[in-house]
Image (cartoon, coloured by chain):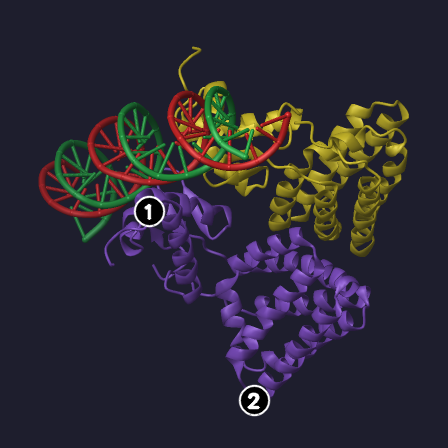
Chain colours: A purple, B yellow, C green, D red
DNA sequence: ATCGGAGATATTGTCAACAATTTCATCGAC
DNA sequence: GTCGATGAAATTGTTGACAATATCTCCGAT
């Protein structure tokens, strides 16, 4: 084990996962240049794999690919983040609506659990837990909705927001603000009220947009 | 001129455009297998270009890429079309809302023109013209909205629907049904009424969904 | 000191041959 | 006649070397 490079599809997957993670962890700064050979070395893959991986990431909007000049980590401005979140708002609204129509008893039970777990987490100030539950809730609503198209679009949009979600969850007082909004979504779905579920989801994301707008801009270009 | 193969980025672009067009024109049946060497020959490109082009098309959801087994034209079922159109509904609703808020005098003039041109086309039974105006209207609303993220998502979704849009526009009586809906969208934007614009856009696409549901399924697999 | 250009270096893009895998056709057993 | 195996053909996947381009470095002129 050790220095055999992952080749082909395995390699490509490795690189995609690796870059995604590095991006989420903040190890790669927005705007940073991504050199194919460097990536190949760090992830022990071939340059071909890296090349394909970069194309995949570019298609997902995580990386910017400029012909003959290589790849950079895509820079997402606050305005971009707002536009993305506006789209999330209507798409999650759609998902919440469908979820309210289709949720099975099992789905409802899980939703209820997440709801109470969220309240506990906020009560005890466990920010990390609350953030994780937040992600799980949004994912669950999308999955339960059966709206696979919206689900994949949301996946994509969320991927582009990693950096901002990070910063937002850490804001003091934010959980207190978002918890009742999350509860409203859960309650509407449990009550089987599609219109209320859509309204609640959109209201929640509108509030996220407000928070984004109040953001000073996530880093005025260091390099 | 003639038998020099387009190479590199030129080649890739050629292939992407070529396949897109063939797909729109119905020259490639859904489910049809796409063999790399064949495509390379027909589009006078190298296999590398074809390979990259296929990945791009797969990312756009037009082609299905199965490892080690090649590429096929993606089959879109009626259910898929409905899910796609549901997403279009909320996204175009968002665009219509923003367009109502932001349209300049110039934008409004163009919108007005398209509206009257649509009425003329329907009056005189010019189906092809009406269909083209339809596309132009939807595109214009998206562009005027300034919601570039929604615009690109819609682009993608529309690309996947080419076959269905085709069939739908040809239905007898359909123009009479959709014309007032289009007028409602235009009027709401002209009036600067965001809520009404969103409602009108969603209502229009809800009606499209109804039409899709009444479709017998676009071709029960010939091959 | 700053600007601009020539050469060197680094980086991306291309290609054709080769390897691995799947698909197809043929043939034999039941 | 159907099913399954065996081998041939077709197809996709991978690789490394090479070509084209961009970027950097250094130097001289103003």
- Is residue A210 at all visible to an observer of this figure? no
Of labels 2 and 1, the one closer to you = 1
Cα gap from disc 2 to disc 1, whole angstroms: 46 Å
Q: Residue B154 location in percent, x, y?
A: 65, 44
Instruction: Label 1: state its secondary structure.
Output: loop
Residue B41, given in percent of the width and then of the height, sits at: 46, 19
Look at 77% across and 73% down and name the residue there.
Answer: A190
Tag 2 secondary structure: loop
Which is more N-terminal, label 1 or label 2?
1
What is the quadrant of residue B47 in the picture?
A: top left
Which percent across, then down, holds residue A139? Answer: 61, 64
**Which subunit holds the residue at mark 1?**
A
Q: Residues within 10 Å of mark 1 (few under 14, many from 20)?
A: some
Quadrant, the C terminus of chain B = top right
Q: Say which residue label 2 marks.
A: A124
Vertical relation: A7 (above or below) B51: below
Look at mark 1 in the image and give the residue it sits on: A7
Task: Examine the rendered structure and indicate whether residue B83 appears above or below residue C23.
Answer: below
Question: Which residue is most to the top?
Answer: B1
Residue A211 position by quadrant: bottom right
Tell which residue pokes out farthest to the bottom in this image: A124
Q: Which residue does the image show at 52% across and 39% down from the upper left?
A: B65
């Amino acid at each position: 084990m050790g220095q055999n490079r992952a080749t082909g599809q395995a390699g490509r997957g490795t690189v995609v996962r690796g870059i995604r993670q590095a991006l989420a962890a903040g190890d790669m700064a927005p705007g940073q240049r991504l050199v194919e050979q460097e990536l190949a070395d760090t992830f022990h893959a071939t340059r071909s794999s890296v090349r394909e991986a970069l194309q995949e990431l570019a298609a997902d909007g995580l990386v910017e690919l400029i012909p003959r000049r290589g790849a950079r980590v895509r820079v997402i401005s606050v305005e971009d983040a707002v536009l993305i979140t506006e789209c999330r708002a209507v798409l999650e609204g759609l998902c919440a609506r469908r979820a309210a129509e289709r949720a099975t008893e099992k789905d409802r039970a899980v939703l209820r659990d997440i709801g109470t777990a969220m309240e506990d987490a906020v009560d005890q100030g466990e920010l990390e837990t609350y953030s994780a539950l937040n992600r799980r809730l949004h994912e669950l609503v999308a999955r339960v909705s059966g709206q696979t198209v919206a689900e994949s679009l949301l996946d994509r949009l969320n991927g582009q927001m990693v950096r901002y979600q990070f910063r937002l969850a850490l804001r003091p007082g934010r959980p207190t603000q978002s918890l009742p909004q999350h509860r409203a979504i859960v309650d509407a779905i449990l009550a089987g009220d599609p219109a209320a579920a859509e309204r609640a989801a959109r209201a929640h994301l509108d509030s996220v947009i407000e928070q984004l707008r109040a953001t000073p801009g996530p880093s005025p270009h260091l390099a």
